[in-house]
Each structure stands twice: as C-alpha cells, then as structure tokens.
Image: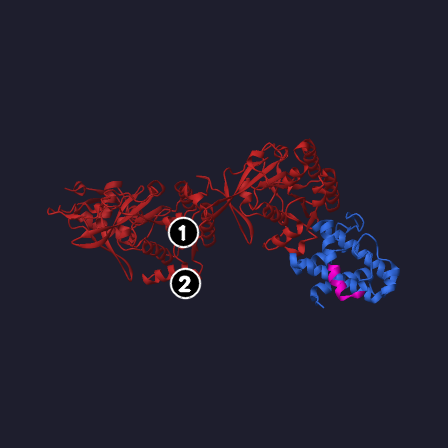
C-alpha cells in the first residue's frame, strides 16, 4: 500500500511541514500526527525491543518503485537472517523486495572500521536508487568497532551522513543498541527524532514500551507507550493522557439495568454516559447483573461491548443462557462484541484500544467490564502499580466516547466490616454511580441484598433490598426498612416500625413526588425525563398525587404541596 | 544423487537461459558462466557480503560436483578467475552447462533453507533483471541508469 504524504497544518504565516505516515498503528498518534519527512532519526533500545521490525514496517509502508526504501546492514543481524525472520510479518511483501525495498549488507566495510568506505557505498547506493527512506542497522555496533579513540572521526561521519541523506530528500533512521547513559553520543545531538524502545521482564511477563525522546517540529505525546509485536508487526498503544480523549456530549435520558425494580431504585435507570460500578463479594451475581444490563440494551436496539478477563467467552455465553440471556444472536448480528483479554502481560492502553475499536466498529452504547479485579490480574505487574490512575484514564476515555459503562468489582467482606468500603481500588471517585451488594443474615438464612450507594447528580433510593438469582435472572425482593445494621451483615429487626413517609403511595408515585419536591414546578414531560418512567403513565400518577393533595396543578405544571414534605 | 527441488532448478534454468540462450558453443558457455558468476556475486553479496557469498557458493559447488563430474575438472568456478573456453571445451560444453545449472540450483536450495524457497527464488530471479534504477553492475556492485 502506498501512502500519501501527510501535510501538517501550520499556523497562519508559518510554513507547513510535510509528514510521513509511519504505517505503524498508533505511532503517528504518539508522534503528534506523523513523522516529519526528511528527518534524520535514531531508533534506540536494547536487543529484542522491536527496533528492526518497527523500521522495516515503516520502510514497507513508505517505499514505492519510484522512491524505494533501502535497508543497510552494518553490523549485527545479517541481512539474510533479518530477511528470514522479517518475512514472517504480514507487512513484509516478498514481491516488493528488490523493486520497492532494497537491502544492502556493508558488514565487511564496517568490520574493518572503514567509515569512509561505508559512507562511499551508502552514497553510491542512494545515488543509484533515489530512495525515500533509508534505514541503517546497527549504527551502535559501528561506534563500538571504530572505538573511543576515533570519536571525532565518527562524529564527522554522522554529520556527513546526515547531510547527504537530507540533501537527497531522504527520511532516515539509524538503529542502535544504546543505553540511557550514552545520551551524550554525538548522534543524539544530530538526530531530529529519537524513538526509545525498551523491554522489561517482570516474572513471566514481558512489557515493551516506546518513548518519543524528541521529534523536531511535532507536539509528540509524552510518556511511555506500550508496544506489542504480533504477526502484523509492531503496534503502539498510545498512553491516553487524562482528559485528552474524545469528548462526546451526553445524550441525556436513562438506560435500563434490565432488572425490574432496580431502575426505580436508581431514579429511573442509569443516566446515559455514566460509569457505574457494581461491587460485591463472590457469588452475589455481579456477572448476571452485567448480562442483564447488556440484554436490556440489545432489546432496546443498542449495541454493546463486554470485556471479560476471567472466563472464556464460550463459558460466559453458556452462563448467560442459564439466566435467560441469549447473547449469541447479537454476536452473529454484530450487535455485541465480547472481548476476551487474559494474557498476563496486558497493558491498560491495549485494553482501552481493543474496547475503543470495538465500540466504534459496532457503535456500541453500552460497555461492560467484567471484572475490574480480573482486569488487574491480567495486567503485567509493571502496570498494576499505577492501576488506579490507569483505570481512571480508561473510564474517562470510554465515557468520553458517549458510552454508558457497567463495571463489576469483587470485594472481600471482612469480619466486622461495618462500613461501605467497596473495593481495594477506592473506585468511588472514578465512577458516577455505585451499587453495592452484600450478604446478610436474616432469620438464620443467608440472603443477598443490594443498595444504591451513589448516583451522581440524581435522586435515588437509599433502601436495602433483598434479591435472588433465578433461572430467569434477578428478582428483587422486599425492602429491608424494618432492619438496622444491614451493613454489618447481621441486621436486627426493629420492633417499632416507623410509619411510611407517604402512606398509600406506590414506589413510582413516591419517586415522582420526591422529584417534584426536589425540583419544584415541573411539566409531566420533565418528570418523565428526570425519573425515566414511561411518559404515558406520568399524568395518571400526577393526577392521583393531586387528588391526595400531595401536589397541585397550575398551568400545565405540578408543584409540591405542604403535605408532600411528610410528617 | 540428491534430487534438486523443481523450483530451484527452474530458477537456475531461467538464469542460465537469460545468460546463455540456446548457445552450446564453448566460448559462449564460458562467457555465460562468467556473467552469471558476477551477477550472483553482486546480487547475493548485497545480502550476505562477499565472504558469505563465497561460502555459500563453495557449498553449492561441492553438491553439484558430486552429481556432475564435468565440474570437477574446472578451476575458477565462482572465483575471481574466469572460466576459460579451453576448460569448457575439454569437459564438453553440454556437461559443463548442465553442471552450472545444477550448481545454481544447489545455491538456490541452500539459500532457501535460510530464507525459504520462495524468497530465494525471488532473489535469484531478480539477479540480472533490469529494474527502474538500472542493472546491478557486474564489476562494482553499483548500478547505472538505463
């Protein structure tokens, strides 16, 4: 594939910069758009960090018959060995070797330390081929061969090489195995761009990263970006900075959880664009809740993405069916994507990239992460250290796309844990809404209960309600208003049952009444929008509240009466 | 006798046909052998250097000599000294031509063990083939526009 040169848009009155599409997924973004054409670059890093593959990919992406690519081997991996392995990558097109992409082995000249000879051969080859891109591998070995005593000669060589390549209108890359304490090497001064690749081994995980140390003329993305080498070559996963993701305006309205009764507890469902965390101990049905959330979206014609980290998708689908949620049709119809990520060297940015791609491809409105705990386990140890910060970026980036997120997290209930401590991650600041599940002992029986802990900017019920997981999903049970000490797990029944705040009203009527009390004068349409209740039933509810003297009706709007404040 | 792979033999025959055509005159065979030797050295030397090419060629020659005794009596094959017309005449033009094709086929096969047969055939097919930037010179390894 021949890529067209990109043009950097310049400020008025300033010259623009011709850019080179690197052809390496994610790299353009990290570079601030693309790589400046005609730049003289250094690709540095340790062995196995992906230097050769990255430049080879770049070479194939930009080489044409008219302006080919030239890969020069000085020392290190021989051209033939490199060919043996590089041809295994998808980007390597054998038919283009010798026409669009040329190779030249100068190891004999380099071994002799004959810098002039090396330069003469390079210039002759450049003169013959007129390449657009030249890669010299491995430049660091040449430095070692020449030796410290001839540093001046090497400096001279680098300057002349850079000059020749630039005057021939070539974008060039020198590959070298450098370490950080070698930053004083003259080549670092001459280079317009420096890409630093590293490889970190921690226990059984390997993490490769890329850093743009400098790139003249571009506003590159700071930090260490994860890279992965697959059959497709090198892929860079840009480290999305906080707040730098796409921002889509919220559509408004609420999304059903798919669980009868829970939407009412949440004031009408999950506000669109929110991030909800469902926290609970093992076996409380977190995954079932997540499946119901997805099923409700699919039933409403919305696409969804589920990221799972613990179970194989096939097991997950079987489990969904056991609670009356059949997701297979939705997958076939491309309305649902299940992303299964379970390597132990995963990075947050890779996960984000996978989910974001799936969201875009099927225009998903709902995203499930099941579970945050499993996600953390799948990460390489190096990424677990800053997991909270990474999670914050991930949630921000995904809700920025306009999707509504539903994440599950497992909590460990400690003995005598009297608080509403949700997770070890302190997720409350990360999320808009939190629903907490817990086990409670009632009359000698272990029951499951849930409570809506937090709904950002929205009224919600504070009542604990029991629930059961059945063959058809989740059945909410009675409210535990008669009990105290539920959060201890061992509630006690109160002998004095306080009178209901609004005797005789249904849950929906209470919800509507509390909304009118909180907001003030409201039209039926406003009430429907704020509560998420069906619009056609709102007027009936409001008229009943008028009859009971909870609200009054004036000019199409409803206002709270003094009785509505309660006893 | 070790059978050569059909793809390697085909590539060798194509290269030979480009260099020698239908000729069986000893002087034409000697000239074609010199051309092929130079082109292979220049073309494959780009990948493996002169020393690497020499090593590969020696192995290919050893394999071909076992099957083609006519090559046994020839000095200078693949080296700096050109193959002489007299030497070809002494061994017989046809046996020498067949031996040279077998040597190139062995070379392709050895190369194919390292980089895969398809790629090896691709590289040998390109040798001596004009490209938009000119043919690789047989003397210096540099090209000339044309």
Give the residue at x 39% y 51%.
A367
- For residue B124, what is the image quadrant? bottom right
Q: Residues within 10 Å of mark 1 (few under 14, many from 20)?
A: many
- For residue B24, what is the image quadrant? bottom right
Q: Position of residue A416 (x, y in %)?
A: 22, 44
- Above or below, A499 against A148 in this view is below
Q: Position of residue A556 (x, y in %)?
A: 26, 45
Give the residue at x 39% y 55%.
A302
Q: Position of residue B61 (x, y in %)?
A: 75, 60
Mark carried by residue A289: none
- Determine whether the residue tagged by mark 1 lies in a helix, strand or loop: strand
Comparing A368 with A537, the one in front is A368
**Pointer 1 residue:** A365
Residue B13 appears in the rendering: no
Give the residue at x 71% y 63%.
B8
Q: Give the alpha-carbon distance from disc 1 to disc 2, as whole Å.
A: 18 Å
Q: Is residue A266 magenta?
A: no
Q: Position of residue A205 (x, y in %)?
A: 47, 48
- The tag earlier along the polypeptide, 1 or 2, is 2
- The magenta span reads B60-69
- Determine whether the residue tagged by mark 2 lies in a helix, strand or loop: helix
- Above or below, B130 against A187 in this view is below
The blue one among the chains is: B
**Pointer 2 residue:** A329
Query: Left or right: A181 with respect to B54?
Result: left
Query: Left or right: A34 with respect to B23?
Result: left
Instruction: Give the number of the mark in front: 1 or 2.
Output: 2
The shade of chain A is red
């Amino acid at each position: 594939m021949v890529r067209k040169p990109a043009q950097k848009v310049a400020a008025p009155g300033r010259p623009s910069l011709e850019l080179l599409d690197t052809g390496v997924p994610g790299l353009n973004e990290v570079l601030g758009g693309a790589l400046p054409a005609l730049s003289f670059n250094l690709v540095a890093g340790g062995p196995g960090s992906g230097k050769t593959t990255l430049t080879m990919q770049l070479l194939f992406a930009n080489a044409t018959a008219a302006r080919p690519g030239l890969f020069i081997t000085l020392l290190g991996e021989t051209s033939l060995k490199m060919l043996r392995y590089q041809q295994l990558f998808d980007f390597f097109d054998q038919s283009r070797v010798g026409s669009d992409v040329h190779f030249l082995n100068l190891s004999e000249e380099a071994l002799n330390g004959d810098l002039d000879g090396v330069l003469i051969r390079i210039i002759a080859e450049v003169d013959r081929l007129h390449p657009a891109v030249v890669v010299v591998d491995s430049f660091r070995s040449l430095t070692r061969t020449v030796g410290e005593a001839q540093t001046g000669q090497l400096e001279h060589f680098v300057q002349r090489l850079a000059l020749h390549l630039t005057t021939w209108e070539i974008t060039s890359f020198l590959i070298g195995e450098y370490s950080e304490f070698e930053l004083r090497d003259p080549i670092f001064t001459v280079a317009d761009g420096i890409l630093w690749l590293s490889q970190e081994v921690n226990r059984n995980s390997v993490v490769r990263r890329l850093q743009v140390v400098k790139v003249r003329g571009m506003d590159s993305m700071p930090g260490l970006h994860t890279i992965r080498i697959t059959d497709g070559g090198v892929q860079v996963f840009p480290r999305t900075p906080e707040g730098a993701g796409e921002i889509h305006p919220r559509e408004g309205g609420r999304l059903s959880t798919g669980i009868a009764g829970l939407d009412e507890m949440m004031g009408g469902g999950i506000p669109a664009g929110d991030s909800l965390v469902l926290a609970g101990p093992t076996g409380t049905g977190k995954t079932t809740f997540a499946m119901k959330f997805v099923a409700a979206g699919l039933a409403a014609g919305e696409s969804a993405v589920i990221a799972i980290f613990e179970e194989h998708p096939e097991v997950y689908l079987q489990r969904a069916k056991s609670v009356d949620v059949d997701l297979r049709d939705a997958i076939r119809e491309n309305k649902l994507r299940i992303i299964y990520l379970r390597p132990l060297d995963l990075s947050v940015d890779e996960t984000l990239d996978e989910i974001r791609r799936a969201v875009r491809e099927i225009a998903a409105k709902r995203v499930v992460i099941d579970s945050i705990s499993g996600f953390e386990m799948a990460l390489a140890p190096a990424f677990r250290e800053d997991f909270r910060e990474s999670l914050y970026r991930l949630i921000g980036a995904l809700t920025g796309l306009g999707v509504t997120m539903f994440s599950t997290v497992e909590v460990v209930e400690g003995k005598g844990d009297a608080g509403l401590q949700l997770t070890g991650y302190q997720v409350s600041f990360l999320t808009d809404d939190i629903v907490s599940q817990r086990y409670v002992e009632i009359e000698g029986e272990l029951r499951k209960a849930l409570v809506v802990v937090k709904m950002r900017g929205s009224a919600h019920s504070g009542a604990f309600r029991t629930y059961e997981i059945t063959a058809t999903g989740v059945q909410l049970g009675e409210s535990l208003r008669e009990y105290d000490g539920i959060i201890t797990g061992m509630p006690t029944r109160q002998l004095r049952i306080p009178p209901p705040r609004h005797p005789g009203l249904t849950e929906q009527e209470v919800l509507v009444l509390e909304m009118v009390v909180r907001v003030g004068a409201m039209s039926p349409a406003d009430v429907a929008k704020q509560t998420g209740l069906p619009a056609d039933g709102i007027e009936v509810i409001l008229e009943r509240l008028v009859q009971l003297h909870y609200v009054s009706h004036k000019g199409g709007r409803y206002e709270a009466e003094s009785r509505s404040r309660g006893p | 006798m070790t059978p050569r792979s059909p793809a390697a033999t085909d590539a060798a025959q194509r290269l030979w046909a480009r260099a020698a055509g239908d000729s069986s005159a000893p002087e034409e065979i000697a000239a074609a052998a010199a051309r092929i030797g130079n082109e292979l050295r220049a073309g494959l030397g780009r990948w493996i250097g002169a020393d690497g090419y020499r090593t590969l060629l020696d192995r290919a020659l050893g394999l071909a000599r076992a099957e083609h005794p006519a090559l046994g009596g020839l000095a200078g094959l693949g080296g700096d000294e050109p193959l002489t017309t007299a030497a070809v005449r002494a061994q017989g033009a046809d046996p020498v031509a067949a031996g040279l094709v077998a040597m190139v086929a062995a070379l392709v096969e050895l190369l194919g063990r390292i980089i895969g047969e398809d790629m090896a055939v691709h590289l040998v097919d390109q040798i001596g083939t004009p490209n938009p930037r000119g043919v690789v010179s047989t003397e210096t390894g540099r090209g000339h526009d044309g």
